[in-house]
Amino acid sequence: MSKNSDGPQPPGPIRVFFDARFTRTTHHDGISRYGSCLLTALLEATAGTDIEVTAIISDEAQLGLLPECTWVKLNSPTSPAEVGIAKSLNDLGADVVFSTMQVMGSMGRRYGLILTVHDLIYYSHPLPPADLPAPVRLLWRLYHLSYAPQRLLLDRADAVAAVSETTKALLADERLTKRPVRVVSNAAEVTAAEKRTVNRAHAKSLVYMGSFMPYKNVETLIRALEHLPGWTLHIASRIEGRREAQLRALIPDRARVVFHRGISDETYAELLESATALVTASRAEGFGLPVIEAMAKGVPVAVSDIPIFHEIAGRAGVYFDQDDPASIAAAVTTLTDPQEWEEKAAAGQEQSQRFAWSDSAEALVDLIREVHAGRA
């Protein structure tokens, strides 16, 4: 007698599509790095499990900055075709889709959807990134005129991922969604280095790594040099010529600012190794990768007195009023005490290990299973 083939069948795999279309093609920005590192960790976390992960790309050049994985090429996220992307994902048999941004099309979807919020910076600092096409910049400004579009998008998802506890708290404060919000944290790519053997308290060298958007407040860092005679500020990141000229006009007499205009990872590591501190006077952040990566290398950090930096730097940070050049100088000067420098360097290395991509991937796996079970 044959067995009954009409009985209960074992459950199939959970087909997860990871939206990696915000990956850059030559070098990472913050969101691109978040997606690439999280995808790498997710693939490791789900290996041998019932979760199958497929990356969504829009340009095959993005594969150069992504881990080796199964992938499918769909429309660009800024294309009008985004309105119909749900049909494509339905046809591909998606069970759960995770996007590293919150602006993914969702009309007609038959799968679970998780959207990501990095920060709410552009509501208070609405200038869009200059590298976006003009129509997208216009939509960007319209989108950030009120919270209504954000609420609409987030409430069309099943769940929301926030990249930090600070962002999660902001979502709650502004009541931006009725959906469950879970932290899928950003993290550093580097693990803590060996304990520092060379004390740089007297190096009088500061490093800034980041963009030059107005909210980054690089202008006040430069003005602080008026109160730091003999110090050098190294600006490591890529900068457009006109923006560099604007910042150069602010340099105080006899102060020294070096514009590196983008450097390799190896050169950046050497620059940090020789520095007294990494500094940032940013008025708002979703996370702050340069801060945590500097801490992992044993480099003290002098940072704005804002919630996100307290979350990621904790007692390892030296804090200042980001709008007061004298306050910045006073905070930096505390690190010229060799014992204080050494204590902050060691505390930073310890603190940096609180954030790991493996933990973020596990949090995402839990959220994927929660969303899938809820829809089932």
Image (tube, rainbow, N blue to C red):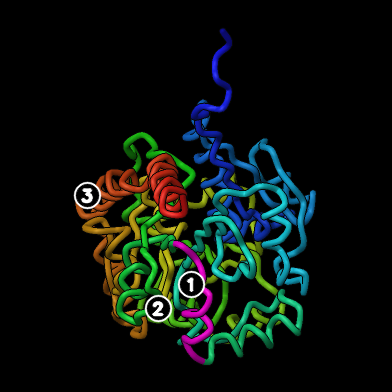
Residue 343 tag number: 3
Tell me where residue 256 appears, x and y as whole percent.
52, 71
Task: Give the mark toward the camera: 3 or 1.
Answer: 1
Give the mark nearer the N terminus: 1 vs 2. 1
For residue 193, side relative to residue 97 (left or right)? left
Q: Find out whether residue 154 is within the magenta segment.
A: yes
Give the mark nearer the N terminus: 3 vs 2. 2
Q: Residue at x 36, y 58 (%)?
A: 182
For residue 335, side relative to residue 369 (left or right)? left
Q: Is residue 254 visible?
A: no
Task: Give the mark toward the camera: 3 or 2.
Answer: 2
Per the image, label 1 sits on a secondary structure element best described as: helix
**Callouts 1 and 2 close, C-beta under 8 Å:** yes
Which residue in the structure is indicated by mark 2? 176
Q: Residue at x 78, y 54 (%)?
A: 59
Residue 275 tag number: none
Q: Find out whether residue 283 is within the magenta segment.
A: no
Q: Residue at x 53, y 83 (%)?
A: 149
Per the image, label 2 sits on a secondary structure element best described as: loop
Label 1: few (<14), some or many (≥20) within 10 Å? many
* Magenta portion: prevailing SS class: helix
For residue 138, side relative to residue 164 (left or right)? right
Tell me where residue 324 appears, x and y as whole percent.
33, 85
Give the mark nearer the N terminus: 3 vs 1. 1
Which residue in the structure is indicated by mark 1? 154
